[in-house]
Image (cartoon, rainbow, N blue to C red):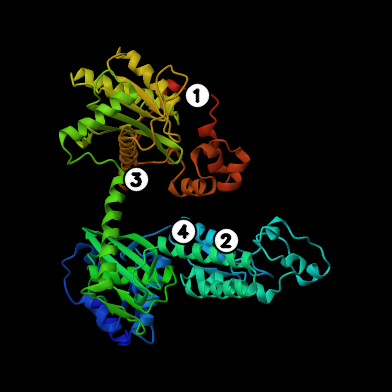
Amino acid sequence: MTAAEFSKLSHTIPLQPGIYKYFDENSEIIYVGKAKSLRKRVSSYFAKNHDNYKTRKLVENIHHIEFTIVNSEQDAFLLENALIKQFQPKYNINLKDDKTYPYMVIRHEHFPRVFLTRNVIRDGSEYLGPFTSVGRVRELLEVIRYNIPLRTCNLLLSPNNIQKGKFKVCLEYHLGNCKGPCEGLQTEDDYRENLSQVKNILKGNLSPVVNMFKEQMQEYAQNMKFEQAEIMRKKIDSLDAYQSKSTIVNTRVGNVDVFTILSEGDTAYVNYLRVLNGTISDTKTVTVEKQLEESDEEVLAYAIGYLRDTFKSLATEIIVPIEVEYPESSVNITIPKGGDKKKLLELSEKNVNYFKEELHRKKILHLEGKSDLERKKVLYQLQADLELPVLPEHIECFDNSNFQGSYPVSACVVFKDGVASKKDYRHFNVKTVVGINDFASMKEVVYRRYSRLLAEQEPLPQLVIIDGGKGQLGAAMESIRALDLIGSMTVVGLAKNEEEIFYPGDKDSLKLPYGSESLKLIRRVRDEVHRFGITFHRQKRSKGTFKNELESIKGIGENTATQLLKMFRSVNKIKGLTLEELVNEIGLAKGNLVYSHFHPTTVDTDNSDPTVS
């Protein structure tokens, strides 16, 4: 949509607050935004030249606009967040959080059970949470089961079944962990009172539970029931011990949400601390991808809305390090200068910094930027673990892949001194293999790689990793033998799933310690060859050079090939179809063409064309 085209319809856009949706020519939502005045906000996109490249591309791709009027800025804010979460438009902030969170469910039934779940089902049950840590939920469950007598059985405790005496109390009753509702020894009203205490514990509000136990302890003591009084005292001690393990800020702080942000180029990290009754009950850090060079204020405002909605926060105060627009009138925004709230903000900042560093550390082993001594230390460790005759200063790794069951390609990455040497990376169109044959493909590319290095008198690697296990390793070794390179370098296979390392001819595999620096480096090399291979596929497809095998059949076009692949998912499955199945799907003439291609009466392998387009 051009500025001239927009000017013809700008007067139809209302001045009220609301949300606007931009659609491309395929009627897909590419951007959702909110505005105090829809007309002013939308007009700003077309009224000036934007410095940001992505913003210019967004405007160029706008085909038509839809808008929704709402009653207030708060409604616009909430609706915008909901639509971004639902549609994930291309040019909106992308908050990476595909995790499912644990809940504590109070089952909708007579004498409700309480247990952990990740599946929220609309069956009338009450779900408390979500929680950021399943470990914390299990700990809470243990605290609850120790202090509150609840049933754990799966019996259908309907009044009719209990009245008929269908059930007998189990060991849990005799241990004091259940009051025996199955035999009518506990009323539903009494059980519901226990559930109210469970809810208090889950919400971090332990005072009512402790006070109730203290009253019962005194009552037992006055009635000379000292054993029961001792049980109550132990329950009080257990709740005190649980609370002391939590980070207590100050009970006067009450219920607050704390957010901090750390930006790094087009990526931002946002940490959320949930404080209930002065105790930190949950913490969560998320990664946010900026799409239109959004400011920290914009990113933080979006993340606040997303996280408060996800974790069902009802806190009426939000602590942040910078000014943000948060239109919910009942919520106060605080930028503390000192005191307990400032300490909370600093703690959140520590968490977000730790998350960023830990993310980088876990993702890959970064040797870039480290000293020669540090890099050498990892290489010496790898040499010792793999029992290599020389230090693996030059490592190469191969991987095969294919697209929709045809046209195999391979990739080779090179690491020198523990660091990726991207100028030495190579990818291969497999030339001598007809169809999909990982072993033959590996044999070809290994031969091509090292015959060329020999011809050009280039140095050989000390370690070669074949991604794929024993079969691919055996195929690679055929080429190594043919080139008379046995003993010139160490070649190992890496099993894809178990991260086992195989040596040629050995029956048993080698497993490196899970957290060892050696295995981290091998993972880094393997992940890099996967990334490089996938990038090669994408480049081929974007240039239109990746032609499907079906389209190479004379008389079969792109539409027919697409129709078959959508129905049968891969070329390999299509090869196995009967003539009748093909005719039923694409008609007699085309069905015959496809069937004849895959089932010729004679196969002339010498005249086949193995070259990949």
> Which image quadrant for residue 170?
bottom right
Mark 4: secondary structure: helix
The alpha-carbon separation of the residues under discs 2 and 4 comes to 15 Å
Q: Amino acid at mark 2?
A: Tyr
Q: Nearer the viewer, residue 52 or 308?
A: 308
> Which image quadrant for residue 157?
bottom right
The alpha-carbon separation of the residues under discs 3 and 1 comes to 29 Å
User: In this figure, which residue is indicated by the disc labeled 3?
Assistant: 541
Q: Amino acid at mark 1?
A: Val
Please, which residue is most extreme toward the right here? 164
Please, which residue is most extreme toward the top here? 484
Q: Position of residue 576 (x, y in %)?
A: 57, 36
Residue count near mark 2 (Cα–Cα under 10 Å), binned few <14, some 14–19, many ≥20: some
Instruction: Tell me if residue 147 comes above or below residue 211 in the rendering.
Output: above
Q: Quadrant of the N terminus?
A: bottom left
The alpha-carbon separation of the residues under discs 2 and 1 comes to 74 Å
Instruction: Tell me if residue 59 comes above or below residue 485 in the rendering.
Output: below
> Which dot marks residue 146?
2
User: In this figure, which residue is indicated by the disc labeled 4?
Assistant: 136
